[in-house]
Image (spheres, helix red, strand yellow):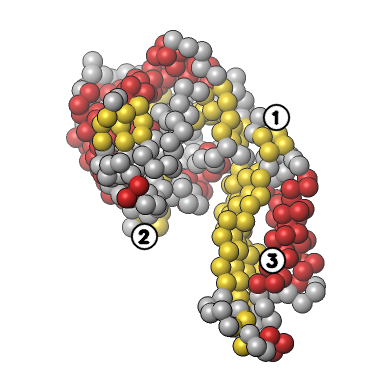
Amino acid sequence: MSIINDSQKIQILSDLVSINSVNGNEKEVAIYLSNLFKKYGIESKLIEVIPGRSNLIASIGHGKPVLGYAVHLDVVDIVDKSKWNSDPFTLTVKQGKLYGRGSVDMKSGVAAMAISLIELNANNCIQNGTLEFLATIGEEVGEPGSQYFYENGYMDNVDALVIGELSGYQVVHAHKGSMDMRLTSIGKTAHSSMPELGYNAIDPLIDLISNANRTFRSYNKSDAILGSFTFNTTIFNSGTQVNSIPENAIAEINARTIPEFDNLMVEDNMNTLIAKVNSMGANIKLDTYMSLKSINVTPSSSLAKLAQKVGKKYTGNNIPTSSIAPVTDASNLLRGKTDNFPFIAFGPGNETVHQINEYVEKEMYFNFIDIYQDIAKEYLS
Protein backbone atom coordinates (compact mmCIF):
# COMPACT_ATOMS: atom_id res chain seq x y z
CA MET A 1 0.00 0.00 0.00
CA SER A 2 1.37 3.38 -1.02
CA ILE A 3 1.82 5.81 1.89
CA ILE A 4 3.28 8.71 -0.06
CA ASN A 5 1.48 9.71 -3.27
CA ASP A 6 3.10 11.02 -6.45
CA SER A 7 2.60 14.69 -5.67
CA GLN A 8 4.17 14.17 -2.24
CA LYS A 9 7.13 12.39 -3.84
CA ILE A 10 7.69 15.44 -6.03
CA GLN A 11 7.28 17.75 -3.05
CA ILE A 12 9.89 15.88 -1.01
CA LEU A 13 12.42 16.14 -3.82
CA SER A 14 11.48 19.80 -4.28
CA ASP A 15 12.07 20.46 -0.58
CA LEU A 16 15.50 18.81 -0.76
CA VAL A 17 16.56 20.71 -3.88
CA SER A 18 15.48 24.00 -2.28
CA ILE A 19 18.05 23.52 0.48
CA ASN A 20 21.33 24.97 -0.76
CA SER A 21 23.73 22.29 0.47
CA VAL A 22 26.67 23.30 -1.71
CA ASN A 23 29.79 21.89 -0.05
CA GLY A 24 28.95 22.50 3.57
CA ASN A 25 25.28 23.18 4.38
CA GLU A 26 24.24 19.57 4.81
CA LYS A 27 22.84 19.87 8.33
CA GLU A 28 19.63 21.47 7.11
CA VAL A 29 19.11 18.52 4.76
CA ALA A 30 19.78 16.07 7.60
CA ILE A 31 17.27 17.89 9.83
CA TYR A 32 14.66 17.82 7.06
CA LEU A 33 15.11 14.06 6.62
CA SER A 34 15.02 13.50 10.38
CA ASN A 35 11.72 15.35 10.62
CA LEU A 36 10.35 13.47 7.61
CA PHE A 37 11.24 10.12 9.17
CA LYS A 38 9.76 11.18 12.51
CA LYS A 39 6.50 12.11 10.80
CA TYR A 40 6.20 8.49 9.65
CA GLY A 41 7.34 6.87 12.89
CA ILE A 42 11.02 6.25 12.13
CA GLU A 43 13.67 7.32 14.63
CA SER A 44 16.89 8.81 13.29
CA LYS A 45 20.08 10.31 14.65
CA LEU A 46 22.09 13.34 13.54
CA ILE A 47 25.83 12.90 14.03
CA GLU A 48 27.98 16.03 13.93
CA VAL A 49 31.11 15.25 11.93
CA ILE A 50 32.38 18.82 11.50
CA PRO A 51 30.92 21.77 13.43
CA GLY A 52 27.65 22.65 11.71
CA ARG A 53 27.75 19.60 9.41
CA SER A 54 25.96 16.38 10.32
CA ASN A 55 25.63 12.85 9.00
CA LEU A 56 22.32 11.09 9.59
CA ILE A 57 21.49 7.47 10.31
CA ALA A 58 18.14 5.67 10.55
CA SER A 59 17.08 2.04 10.43
CA ILE A 60 14.07 -0.24 10.31
CA GLY A 61 13.79 -3.92 11.13
CA HIS A 62 16.18 -5.70 13.45
CA GLY A 63 18.98 -8.24 13.50
CA LYS A 64 20.98 -9.71 10.64
CA PRO A 65 21.55 -9.37 7.78
CA VAL A 66 22.05 -5.62 7.58
CA LEU A 67 21.49 -3.98 4.21
CA GLY A 68 22.84 -0.45 3.95
CA TYR A 69 21.27 2.27 1.81
CA ALA A 70 23.80 5.12 1.54
CA VAL A 71 23.41 8.65 0.18
CA HIS A 72 25.24 11.96 0.39
CA LEU A 73 23.66 15.27 1.33
CA ASP A 74 25.89 17.85 -0.38
CA VAL A 75 25.81 19.15 -3.95
CA VAL A 76 28.31 20.95 -6.17
CA ASP A 77 28.22 24.68 -6.85
CA ILE A 78 25.94 26.11 -9.54
CA VAL A 79 28.90 28.16 -10.95
CA ASP A 80 26.81 30.74 -12.86
CA LYS A 81 23.13 31.05 -11.98
CA SER A 82 22.49 33.29 -15.00
CA LYS A 83 23.17 30.38 -17.35
CA TRP A 84 20.39 28.25 -15.89
CA ASN A 85 16.97 28.27 -17.54
CA SER A 86 15.32 28.20 -14.11
CA ASP A 87 16.29 28.80 -10.49
CA PRO A 88 18.71 25.96 -9.67
CA PHE A 89 17.35 25.71 -6.13
CA THR A 90 13.71 25.53 -7.20
CA LEU A 91 12.63 22.16 -8.58
CA THR A 92 11.14 22.90 -12.00
CA VAL A 93 8.96 20.30 -13.74
CA LYS A 94 9.04 20.44 -17.52
CA GLN A 95 8.19 17.76 -20.08
CA GLY A 96 8.68 14.89 -17.65
CA LYS A 97 11.98 16.21 -16.33
CA LEU A 98 12.73 17.59 -12.87
CA TYR A 99 15.30 20.41 -13.06
CA GLY A 100 17.43 21.68 -10.18
CA ARG A 101 20.88 21.50 -8.64
CA GLY A 102 21.26 18.08 -7.10
CA SER A 103 18.23 16.65 -8.86
CA VAL A 104 20.59 13.99 -10.22
CA ASP A 105 23.56 14.16 -7.86
CA MET A 106 22.06 13.06 -5.68
CA LYS A 107 18.93 14.37 -4.06
CA SER A 108 16.70 12.20 -6.22
CA GLY A 109 18.63 9.24 -4.82
CA VAL A 110 18.28 10.67 -1.30
CA ALA A 111 14.54 11.16 -1.71
CA ALA A 112 13.99 7.77 -3.35
CA MET A 113 15.85 5.88 -0.61
CA ALA A 114 14.18 7.87 2.17
CA ILE A 115 10.70 7.32 0.73
CA SER A 116 11.42 3.61 0.25
CA LEU A 117 12.38 3.37 3.94
CA ILE A 118 9.13 5.06 4.94
CA GLU A 119 6.98 2.86 2.70
CA LEU A 120 8.70 -0.35 3.80
CA ASN A 121 8.30 0.54 7.45
CA ALA A 122 4.65 1.56 7.12
CA ASN A 123 3.82 -1.70 5.41
CA ASN A 124 5.88 -3.78 7.86
CA CYS A 125 7.85 -5.30 4.97
CA ILE A 126 11.19 -5.93 6.71
CA GLN A 127 10.71 -9.18 8.61
CA ASN A 128 14.21 -10.65 8.45
CA GLY A 129 17.11 -8.28 9.11
CA THR A 130 17.77 -4.54 9.14
CA LEU A 131 17.62 -1.83 6.51
CA GLU A 132 19.97 1.00 7.49
CA PHE A 133 19.89 4.47 5.95
CA LEU A 134 23.30 6.19 6.00
CA ALA A 135 23.54 9.83 4.88
CA THR A 136 26.90 11.58 4.65
CA ILE A 137 28.33 15.06 4.41
CA GLY A 138 31.04 16.21 2.03
CA GLU A 139 31.03 13.51 -0.62
CA GLU A 140 31.79 16.10 -3.27
CA VAL A 141 34.83 17.43 -1.38
CA GLY A 142 36.99 15.02 0.62
CA GLU A 143 34.36 12.57 1.86
CA PRO A 144 34.66 13.32 5.60
CA GLY A 145 31.18 11.92 6.24
CA SER A 146 31.86 8.45 4.91
CA GLN A 147 35.29 8.50 6.53
CA TYR A 148 33.58 9.16 9.87
CA PHE A 149 31.18 6.26 9.37
CA TYR A 150 34.07 3.92 8.60
CA GLU A 151 36.37 5.09 11.39
CA ASN A 152 33.63 4.94 14.02
CA GLY A 153 32.47 1.42 13.16
CA TYR A 154 29.14 2.19 11.48
CA MET A 155 30.02 -0.16 8.62
CA ASP A 156 31.20 -3.03 10.80
CA ASN A 157 27.84 -4.81 10.87
CA VAL A 158 26.72 -3.90 7.35
CA ASP A 159 26.50 -7.05 5.22
CA ALA A 160 25.65 -5.45 1.87
CA LEU A 161 25.55 -1.89 0.57
CA VAL A 162 23.63 0.06 -2.05
CA ILE A 163 24.75 3.62 -2.76
CA GLY A 164 22.05 5.64 -4.49
CA GLU A 165 24.48 7.27 -6.91
CA LEU A 166 23.55 8.29 -10.42
CA SER A 167 24.04 5.03 -12.32
CA GLY A 168 20.81 5.18 -14.27
CA TYR A 169 19.65 1.75 -15.34
CA GLN A 170 22.99 0.02 -14.87
CA VAL A 171 24.44 -1.65 -11.81
CA VAL A 172 27.82 -0.15 -10.90
CA HIS A 173 30.33 -2.31 -9.04
CA ALA A 174 33.58 -0.41 -9.66
CA HIS A 175 35.05 3.07 -9.87
CA LYS A 176 38.42 4.76 -9.96
CA GLY A 177 40.18 6.14 -6.93
CA SER A 178 40.92 9.83 -6.49
CA MET A 179 43.81 11.79 -5.02
CA ASP A 180 44.00 15.51 -4.35
CA MET A 181 47.54 16.82 -3.86
CA ARG A 182 48.84 20.28 -3.05
CA LEU A 183 52.38 21.32 -3.98
CA THR A 184 53.76 24.37 -2.17
CA SER A 185 56.95 25.97 -3.48
CA ILE A 186 58.77 28.39 -1.16
CA GLY A 187 61.04 31.05 -2.65
CA LYS A 188 62.25 34.51 -1.71
CA THR A 189 60.67 37.76 -2.83
CA ALA A 190 62.62 40.50 -4.56
CA HIS A 191 62.05 43.36 -6.97
CA SER A 192 61.73 42.02 -10.50
CA SER A 193 64.52 44.37 -11.63
CA MET A 194 66.86 42.56 -9.23
CA PRO A 195 65.78 38.90 -9.44
CA GLU A 196 69.22 37.72 -8.29
CA LEU A 197 68.30 38.91 -4.78
CA GLY A 198 65.35 36.56 -4.59
CA TYR A 199 64.27 33.07 -5.61
CA ASN A 200 61.30 32.66 -7.94
CA ALA A 201 58.99 30.04 -6.43
CA ILE A 202 57.23 29.53 -9.76
CA ASP A 203 60.19 28.23 -11.74
CA PRO A 204 60.91 24.97 -9.89
CA LEU A 205 57.20 24.28 -9.51
CA ILE A 206 56.68 24.55 -13.26
CA ASP A 207 59.64 22.24 -13.82
CA LEU A 208 58.24 19.74 -11.33
CA ILE A 209 54.78 19.75 -12.90
CA SER A 210 56.26 19.31 -16.36
CA ASN A 211 58.37 16.36 -15.17
CA ALA A 212 55.39 14.87 -13.34
CA ASN A 213 53.19 15.12 -16.43
CA ARG A 214 55.84 13.47 -18.54
CA THR A 215 56.53 10.75 -15.96
CA PHE A 216 52.97 9.79 -15.05
CA ARG A 217 51.62 9.91 -18.58
CA SER A 218 54.49 7.81 -19.89
CA TYR A 219 53.39 4.88 -17.73
CA ASN A 220 50.22 4.53 -19.82
CA LYS A 221 48.56 2.40 -17.15
CA SER A 222 45.06 1.08 -17.79
CA ASP A 223 42.56 -1.30 -16.21
CA ALA A 224 40.22 -3.53 -18.20
CA ILE A 225 37.22 -2.43 -16.12
CA LEU A 226 38.11 1.08 -14.93
CA GLY A 227 40.04 2.46 -17.88
CA SER A 228 43.14 4.63 -17.78
CA PHE A 229 45.00 6.26 -14.91
CA THR A 230 44.85 10.05 -15.24
CA PHE A 231 46.97 12.86 -13.76
CA ASN A 232 46.11 16.57 -14.10
CA THR A 233 47.16 19.86 -12.55
CA THR A 234 43.92 21.76 -12.02
CA ILE A 235 44.87 24.82 -9.90
CA PHE A 236 47.93 27.09 -10.00
CA ASN A 237 48.37 30.24 -7.90
CA SER A 238 51.34 32.52 -7.32
CA GLY A 239 52.45 36.10 -6.97
CA THR A 240 50.81 39.31 -5.85
CA GLN A 241 52.01 41.82 -8.42
CA VAL A 242 53.76 41.72 -11.76
CA ASN A 243 56.97 43.49 -10.74
CA SER A 244 57.76 41.30 -7.73
CA ILE A 245 59.49 37.93 -7.69
CA PRO A 246 56.98 35.56 -6.03
CA GLU A 247 58.02 34.02 -2.72
CA ASN A 248 55.55 31.15 -2.98
CA ALA A 249 53.62 29.21 -5.57
CA ILE A 250 50.93 26.60 -5.08
CA ALA A 251 49.65 23.98 -7.50
CA GLU A 252 46.91 21.43 -6.92
CA ILE A 253 46.74 18.13 -8.73
CA ASN A 254 44.07 15.47 -9.13
CA ALA A 255 44.94 11.89 -10.03
CA ARG A 256 42.36 9.20 -10.82
CA THR A 257 43.84 5.91 -9.76
CA ILE A 258 43.39 2.26 -10.70
CA PRO A 259 44.69 -0.95 -9.10
CA GLU A 260 47.53 -1.11 -11.63
CA PHE A 261 48.69 2.34 -10.51
CA ASP A 262 47.32 2.99 -7.06
CA ASN A 263 47.46 5.88 -4.62
CA LEU A 264 50.64 4.71 -2.88
CA MET A 265 52.46 4.45 -6.21
CA VAL A 266 51.41 7.98 -7.11
CA GLU A 267 52.66 9.39 -3.83
CA ASP A 268 55.96 7.49 -4.03
CA ASN A 269 56.58 8.80 -7.55
CA MET A 270 55.71 12.35 -6.55
CA ASN A 271 58.10 12.22 -3.59
CA THR A 272 60.91 11.01 -5.85
CA LEU A 273 60.31 13.84 -8.31
CA ILE A 274 60.13 16.40 -5.49
CA ALA A 275 63.38 15.13 -3.94
CA LYS A 276 65.12 15.59 -7.28
CA VAL A 277 64.03 19.20 -7.79
CA ASN A 278 64.70 20.04 -4.13
CA SER A 279 68.25 18.70 -4.48
CA MET A 280 68.82 21.44 -7.03
CA GLY A 281 67.84 24.24 -4.65
CA ALA A 282 64.05 24.24 -4.63
CA ASN A 283 61.91 24.00 -1.51
CA ILE A 284 58.74 22.18 -2.47
CA LYS A 285 56.46 20.29 -0.11
CA LEU A 286 53.70 17.80 -0.88
CA ASP A 287 50.39 17.63 0.97
CA THR A 288 48.11 14.78 -0.08
CA TYR A 289 44.89 16.05 1.44
CA MET A 290 42.56 13.46 -0.06
CA SER A 291 43.38 9.89 -1.00
CA LEU A 292 40.51 7.57 -1.90
CA LYS A 293 41.15 4.14 -3.33
CA SER A 294 39.57 2.58 -6.39
CA ILE A 295 36.73 0.10 -5.92
CA ASN A 296 36.25 -3.07 -7.93
CA VAL A 297 34.12 -5.69 -6.24
CA THR A 298 32.50 -8.69 -7.84
CA PRO A 299 29.76 -7.87 -10.37
CA SER A 300 28.12 -11.23 -9.74
CA SER A 301 27.11 -10.89 -6.08
CA SER A 302 23.59 -11.85 -5.08
CA LEU A 303 22.88 -8.15 -4.50
CA ALA A 304 24.02 -7.16 -8.01
CA LYS A 305 21.99 -9.96 -9.58
CA LEU A 306 18.94 -8.97 -7.56
CA ALA A 307 19.26 -5.34 -8.68
CA GLN A 308 19.51 -6.47 -12.30
CA LYS A 309 16.39 -8.58 -11.94
CA VAL A 310 14.40 -5.85 -10.22
CA GLY A 311 15.58 -3.17 -12.64
CA LYS A 312 14.51 -5.21 -15.65
CA LYS A 313 10.99 -5.40 -14.23
CA TYR A 314 10.70 -1.61 -14.53
CA THR A 315 12.54 -1.02 -17.80
CA GLY A 316 11.80 -4.19 -19.78
CA ASN A 317 15.49 -4.28 -20.70
CA ASN A 318 18.48 -6.18 -19.39
CA ILE A 319 20.37 -4.19 -16.77
CA PRO A 320 24.15 -4.32 -17.36
CA THR A 321 26.89 -4.15 -14.75
CA SER A 322 29.45 -1.42 -15.28
CA SER A 323 32.04 0.90 -13.79
CA ILE A 324 32.06 4.70 -13.49
CA ALA A 325 34.94 7.18 -13.42
CA PRO A 326 33.83 9.41 -10.50
CA VAL A 327 34.72 8.36 -6.97
CA THR A 328 31.95 7.65 -4.43
CA ASP A 329 31.60 7.20 -0.68
CA ALA A 330 32.29 3.50 -1.30
CA SER A 331 36.01 4.30 -1.14
CA ASN A 332 35.59 4.82 2.60
CA LEU A 333 32.54 2.69 3.34
CA LEU A 334 34.14 -0.42 1.82
CA ARG A 335 37.48 -0.04 3.57
CA GLY A 336 38.35 -3.36 5.16
CA LYS A 337 35.80 -5.25 3.04
CA THR A 338 36.83 -7.96 0.59
CA ASP A 339 36.41 -7.91 -3.19
CA ASN A 340 33.49 -10.29 -2.70
CA PHE A 341 31.55 -7.83 -0.56
CA PRO A 342 28.07 -7.26 -2.05
CA PHE A 343 28.16 -3.62 -3.11
CA ILE A 344 26.45 -1.70 -5.90
CA ALA A 345 25.89 1.91 -6.85
CA PHE A 346 22.40 2.09 -8.32
CA GLY A 347 20.33 5.23 -8.57
CA PRO A 348 18.49 7.71 -10.78
CA GLY A 349 20.83 9.64 -13.04
CA ASN A 350 22.02 10.78 -16.43
CA GLU A 351 24.77 12.80 -18.11
CA THR A 352 23.62 16.18 -16.70
CA VAL A 353 25.42 15.52 -13.41
CA HIS A 354 27.26 18.68 -12.20
CA GLN A 355 26.09 20.55 -15.30
CA ILE A 356 23.97 23.63 -15.93
CA ASN A 357 20.25 22.72 -16.12
CA GLU A 358 20.78 19.43 -14.28
CA TYR A 359 17.66 17.28 -14.32
CA VAL A 360 16.35 13.82 -13.47
CA GLU A 361 13.58 12.09 -15.40
CA LYS A 362 10.42 11.95 -13.28
CA GLU A 363 9.67 8.38 -14.36
CA MET A 364 13.15 7.21 -13.39
CA TYR A 365 12.89 8.91 -9.99
CA PHE A 366 9.54 7.22 -9.33
CA ASN A 367 10.87 3.88 -10.57
CA PHE A 368 13.81 3.93 -8.19
CA ILE A 369 11.54 4.50 -5.22
CA ASP A 370 9.89 1.18 -6.09
CA ILE A 371 13.17 -0.49 -7.09
CA TYR A 372 14.70 0.25 -3.68
CA GLN A 373 11.66 -1.21 -1.95
CA ASP A 374 11.75 -4.36 -4.07
CA ILE A 375 15.49 -4.88 -3.47
CA ALA A 376 15.12 -4.51 0.29
CA LYS A 377 12.05 -6.74 0.52
CA GLU A 378 13.72 -9.56 -1.38
CA TYR A 379 17.22 -9.22 0.08
CA LEU A 380 15.83 -9.14 3.61
CA SER A 381 13.19 -11.81 3.09
Q: At 53% across and 78% down in the image, what residue appears?
A: 240
Labels 3 & 1 near each other (Cβ < 8 A)? no
Vertical side of 55 occupied by 275: above or below: below
Q: At 32% across and 28% down in the image, what residue appears?
A: 97
**Is residue 194 visible in the rendered structure shown here?**
yes
Nearest to N terminus: mark 3 or mark 1: 3
**Quadrant that contains the C terminus:** top left
**Is residue 63 visible in the rendered structure shown here?**
no
Residue type, mark 3 in image: Ile
Q: At 37% across and 49% down in the image, what residue appears?
A: 78
C-alpha span from label 3 to label 1: 33 Å
C-alpha span from label 3 to label 2: 37 Å
Residue 187 in picture, x, y percent from top left: 66, 79
Labels 1 & 2 near each other (Cβ < 8 A)? no
Residue 312 in picture, x, y percent from top left: 45, 13
Q: According to the image, label 3 marks what residue? A: 206
Residue type, mark 1 in image: Ala
Question: Of discs 1 and 2, which sits in the foreground?
Answer: 1
Q: Secondary structure at mark 1?
A: loop
Mark 2 Cα within 10 Å, few/some/many (few <14, many 20+)? Answer: few
Mark 1 Cα within 10 Å, few/some/many (few <14, many 20+)? Answer: few
Marking on residue 191: none
Q: At 77% across and 77% down in the image, what residue appears?
A: 281
Nearest to N terminus: mark 1 or mark 2: 2
Q: Secondary structure at mark 2?
A: loop
Marking on residue 51: 2
Q: Is residue 365 left or right of residue 341?
A: left
Q: According to the image, label 1 marks what residue? A: 224
Residue type, mark 2 in image: Pro
Q: Nearer the viewer, residue 170 or 340?
A: 170
